[in-house]
Image (cartoon, rainbow, N blue to C red):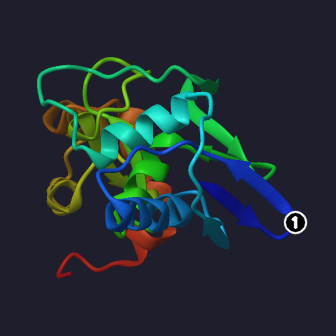
């Protein structure tokens, strides 16, 4: 398969059961790698970690119990690939390949292995809630505790977070501007 975007080209070997499968797989790869168009042709090509990933995705060749480690590039200990002069993170490429609309999502491994790219081992968090330690219910508890005059240290202990998290939450304008009835 030859993937194109503007004047740039990328050759990716794919394996398919028939022509329709090859066409569908090429469309998924084009969407995942943000390509403009593609061409299918027959021939031999070197297998790259990216090609191996797409082959496994096309065959749904993953299991829940086993990690699958990325054999390509990493940036800040996160699996990535460089395509058309742009860095793409592999877990997000997988989301796009599978056509899962997660525009506001950050994909992270749910297992302890940062190199794992098994789709079954991926957890999603919202970009707007990145590194958020308190949920909406905790916000309501925090307001209730504050209304009762409980100290920040005691609130932090009750919510099982560091007191600096409580102080940050109290300084958050959106949080402070809400009324306790919300």
Taking the image as shown, residue 39 lies to the left or right of residue 24, namely right
Report x, y in % for residue 8.
83, 59
Which residue is labeled 1 in the image? 7
Viewer-side residue, 111 vs 25: 25
Q: Which image quarter: residue 67?
A: top left
Q: Image quadrant for the C terminus? A: bottom left
Residue occupying image coordinates x 75% and y 67% = 5
Residue occupying image coordinates x 19% and y 20% = 66
Residue occupying image coordinates x 35% and y 18% = 113
Report x, y in % for residue 62.
21, 33
Viewer-side residue, 55 vs 17: 17
Does residue 18 lie above or below 182 as drawn? above
Q: Residues within 10 Å of mark 1 (few under 14, many from 20)?
A: few
Q: Residue furthest right?
A: 7
Secondary element type, mark 1: loop
Viewer-side residue, 127 vs 70: 70
Report x, y in % for residue 110.
26, 32
Viewer-side residue, 45 vs 50: 45
């Amino acid at each position: 398969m030859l993937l194109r975007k503007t004047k740039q080209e990328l050759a990716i070997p794919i394996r398919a059961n028939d022509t329709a499968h090859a066409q569908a797989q090429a469309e998924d790869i084009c969407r995942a790698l943000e390509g403009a168009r593609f061409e299918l042709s027959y021939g031999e090509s070197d297998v790259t970690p990216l090609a191996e990933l797409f082959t496994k995705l096309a065959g749904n060749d993953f299991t829940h119990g086993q990690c699958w480690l990325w054999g390509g590039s990493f940036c800040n200990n996160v699996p990535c690939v460089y395509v058309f002069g742009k860095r793409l993170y592999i877990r997000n490429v997988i989301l796009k390949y599978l056509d899962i609309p997660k525009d506001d999502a950050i994909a992270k491994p749910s297992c302890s292995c940062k190199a794992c790219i098994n789709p079954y081992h991926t957890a999603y968090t919202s970009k707007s809630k990145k590194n958020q330690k308190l949920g909406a219910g905790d916000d309501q508890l925090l307001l209730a505790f504050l209304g009762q005059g409980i100290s920040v240290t005691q609130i932090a202990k009750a919510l099982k977070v560091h007191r600096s998290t409580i102080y940050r939450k109290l300084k958050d304008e959106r949080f402070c501007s809400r009324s306790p009835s919300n």
